[in-house]
Image (spheres, rainbow, N blue to C red):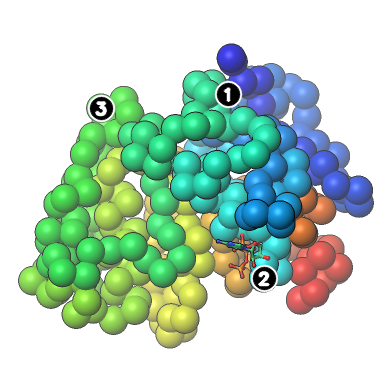
């Protein structure tokens, strides 16, 4: 089955605040990844309730919402860690609804999970090198040397084990590992959680650099101001449904919108 070529995010819940993107934009931009009507249950608990999401090549999207609303569940479903009870996931129009996580990764989707997911017993050097591979189109823009240029702190700790790093360094290593796979989309779930302010600023700098290279991103972070600054669009989830979507720049100038949906 071929997925519709669209970069639109449908706000399926009542209370949508913005119109969908223009038909012209939707018609011309093929989606890198697209979720259609995703429903996910944990046992009897219905956690995702009809989520539509499409991310265009090079597009950066912020995924906002209060605790427990389903953001990580959506990401884990896109990555093949959880199976949707209904709905579809397409990557470049290929049906990947039942593709396992390694197959999703091979499609150029890199995931930096909350809690980081590095190998604690491998050195920094090894953690980076075992992740190395060409991208979907054979691209090798992100080499070991280039990753170390972006993360000078890591280059000073190449022999340290993953478990011999600070929280911020572990986070940098997790992002560095994701870049070593030369992805088309990087998904960052709470990349700055629990880190000191200077390190947080450094992580956002790196996210900004990644964005400039044209890699798409899907970013979950509690600091909505930084998310707005580093994304093209934002979507807000409440109880497994979209309640708001909008252009990040325009949201930044209407703080009441997020106050209403995020309680900030
Ligand atoms: N493995 C699980 N089994 C059962 N329920 C779960 C499981 N994981 C998450 N949930 C529940 O599903 C709902 C959505 O959780 P999820 O982690 O997706 O939310 P979130 O928006 O990412 O929250 P947070 O910002 O706190 O990480 C929550 O009510 C959570 O308690």
Q: Position of residue 200 (x, y in %)?
A: 45, 75
**Which residue sits furthest right?**
15
Residue of label 2: 67
Q: Quadrant of residue 120?
A: bottom left
Q: Quadrant of residue 223?
A: bottom right
Alpha carbon separation for disc pair 3 and 2: 38 Å
Q: Say whether disc 3 or disc 2 marks the residue closer to the N-terminus.
A: 2
Q: In the image, what residue occupies the spot 23% across and 55% down?
A: 147
**Which residue sits furthest bottom?**
196
Location of the C terminus (image quadrant): bottom right
Residue of label 1: 30
**Visible residue check, residue 249:** no
**Can you say whether 218 is above or below 118 in the image?**
above
Front-most of residues 17 and 130: 130
Q: What label does residue 138 carry, if any?
A: 3
The answer as to whether callout 2 falls within 8 Å of ligand 1 is yes
């Amino acid at each position: 089955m071929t997925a519709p070529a669209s970069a639109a995010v449908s706000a399926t819940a009542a209370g949508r605040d913005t119109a969908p993107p223009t038909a012209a934009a939707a018609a011309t931009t093929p989606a890198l990844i697209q979720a259609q009507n995703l429903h996910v249950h944990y046992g009897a608990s219905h956690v995702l309730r009809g989520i539509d999401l499409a991310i265009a090549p090079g597009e950066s999207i912020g995924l906002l919402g209060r605790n427990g609303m389903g953001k990580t569940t959506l990401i884990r479903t896109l990555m093949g860690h959880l199976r949707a009870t209904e709905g579809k996931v397409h990557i470049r129009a290929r049906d990947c609804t039942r593709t396992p996580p390694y197959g999703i990764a091979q499609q150029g989707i890199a995931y930096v999970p909350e809690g980081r997911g590095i190998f604690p017993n491998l050195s920094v050097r090894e953690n980076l090198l075992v992740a190395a591979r060409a991208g979907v189109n054979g691209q090798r823009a992100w080499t070991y040397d280039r990753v170390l240029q972006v993360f000078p702190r890591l280059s000073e700790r190449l022999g340290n084990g993953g478990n011999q790093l600070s929280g911020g360094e572990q986070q940098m290593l997790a992002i560095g590992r994701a870049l070593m796979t030369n992805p088309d989309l990087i998904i960052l779930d709470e990349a700055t959680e629990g880190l000191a302010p200077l390190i947080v600023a450094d992580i956002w700098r790196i996210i900004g650099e990644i964005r400039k290279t044209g890699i798409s991103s899907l970013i979950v972070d509690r600091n909505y101001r930084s998310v707005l600054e580093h994304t093209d669009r934002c979507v807000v989830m409440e109880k497994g449904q979209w309640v708001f979507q909008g252009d990040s720049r325009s949201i930044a100038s209407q703080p009441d919108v997020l106050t209403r949906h995020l309680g900030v």
